Image (cartoon, coloured by chain):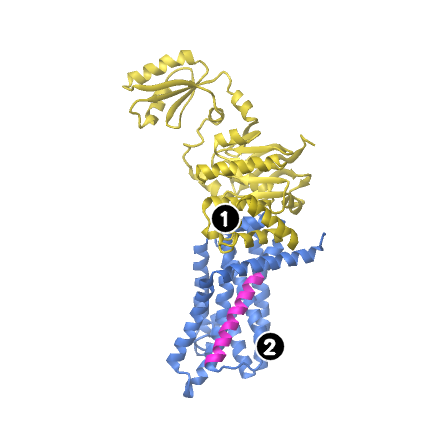
Chain colours: A blue, B yellow
Amino acid sequence: MKKSKPFTLLLHSIYMAENDLRQSFKSVRHVVWSLLFPIFMMFTFSFRYGTVGPDVSFMTFLIPGVVAMTAMFGSINETMSIVWDKSLGVFDRILAAPVSSTSIIIGKTMAGAVMGVISALVLLIIGSLFFGVSFANIGFVLIIIVLASFSFTGIGTIISGLASEPREAMMLSNLLRFPMMFLGGVFFPVEAMPMPLPYIARALPLTYATEALRAVMSGNMTVVLFDAIVLAIYTVGTVVIGSKTLMTIMTR
Amino acid sequence: MASESVIEISNLTKYYGKLLAVDQISFEVKHKELFGLLGPNGAGKTTTIRMICGMLRPTSGKIVVAGFDVSQKPEEVKRRIGLVPDISNLFGELSARTNLEFMGKLYGLDKGTRRERIDQVLELFHLKERQNDLVKYYSKGMHRRLTIAAALIHQPEILVMDEPTSGLDAQTARLVREIIIDLNNEGRTVLLTTHQIDEADKLCQRVGIIDRGHLIALNTPEELKNSIKGIHALEIKVLDGIDQQRWLPIISEAKGIERVFLAEGRIRVLSKDLPQVIPVVVNLIDKHGGKIENISVAQPTLEDAFINLTGKSIREEPVSKEDYLRRRLSRSGMR
């Protein structure tokens, strides 16, 4: 009857993540809206710059960035569930159950990362179907997307942990997401930015995710490796800080 | 076994920063008892309950539930408690069944047991037909039923309910009270909080009165009522008195009066010496131009006892800033 502790921990984490994602996918609008934005961005820019002719290369520039950006939106959106859970009292329900706080944190992090990866993959598929963008090495693409999603989830967790109510969390996350979107090299190359913007860009995980995905396409593996390491560091950093923030609100 | 304590609380104290929410509370809940914590909003009831359930760390003091120290074995305690929160905190985007399924998983029930228990509670609370509807479309009464059902999924020996009937219409509240009595009769220990005095009176075998973080009285409802023995209650209704309130300061001028307050639109006077007080009060009202529509001597109620103990009515108490803060702080996740 009694199962081993790590097993129960993992099982509970999976239940948490499953429950989170189940809710997100149940409200179809939630998913559609969050994907519509990057899809809209992708098509708008394609109309502007054209999908055929000499400018076709712009799409190969844009799509990796949009994919990375979608991972960011998906992950951070999913972590907003934490602040909703807090304000609706759902958190109490979980805290009153014999579930360790570690499972809650792992579960929430998994949910965020999964959402990020799924959203990014949807955009990746749309990108390759409509614009014929092909990624040479899908394995590396996945690694980058997963790492990026985890680091964005960490950021989202920190925001949700610190915010006292949903509105505040939304505002904080937009405050972070939108500058990141424009400075992360998604629409404009970081190299073309005026000083000191490149320095700011270099501090953002999205920049590395975008750069890495582009490098996978062009086959520049040194850059991919470097960016992957940076993203891994970001992942560890943000997830650790995020977990600490969550832990403090759970064990008062 | 009958009189053994299931919940033992000693010198429980909780500070939110500098704010003292619960101050040196000690009490015991006995096996199979229906115990009530009665007090106004912001008295520290929810904070106490959250600490008992291992969701909040006490600043100091000790809580032992079913032989386990909450601070050392929170998971053992949580396994034995079913918590019904004061608000419906189910997942609105999920169906009732999925909600219960999730709770069952968290309590480590295997698939077969889960199905069986879920069917059982859905049946018990008449939610079977709507089990696959999203919970956000449920009515308030259904929400409350499902919240109780969710707390029973792991068949806890102790049921902790925070304001189980607050915000419900009279009919649903009655139903919930019946459910609580049934669950208690089945042999479950029930600890509930309430700010409704008649509820505590009707339901609970013992009542602890809690006010501003202090436990000021603990006894059976009968004994609490007896505690004001010798004090009698007088009910007065002044004619055309839409604003009965204005008579309170006037009447309180009379000598020999313990308390004057409004209860259900009537002026209620507590005194040890009614024969002495009645003519004085009648005179006072007459002198200020009032006509008495109705005057009668009434049985002392638990509310009289409460008011005599705390010096204030539980209903008319305006929410002070500090009370509001206390209430907010005791809620989930908010710091």
Residue furthest to the left in view is B289
* Horizontal and vertical percent position of residue B218: 57, 28
> Considering depth in this image, is B224 or B153 the residue closer to the camera?
B153
Q: Mark 1 lies on which chain?
A: B
Q: Give the range drawn in magenta.
A: A109-130
Residue A125 sits inside the magenta stretch? yes
Residue drawn at point x = 39 percent, y = 81 percent:
A49
Query: Does the residue at mark 1 contact the one at mark 2 (Cβ under 8 Å)?
Result: no
- Name the chain under label 2: A
Q: Where is residue B242 in the image (x, y as percent from the top left)?
A: 31, 28
Left or right relative to B276: residue A89: right
Alpha carbon separation for disc pair 1 and 2: 42 Å
Residue that appears at 48% across and 82% down: A132
**Label number found at residue B334:** 1
Residue A139: assigned label: 2
Instruction: Please say whether residue B83 is visible from this viewpoint.
Output: yes
Q: Which label belongs to residue B118?
A: none
Give amino acid for label 1. Answer: Met
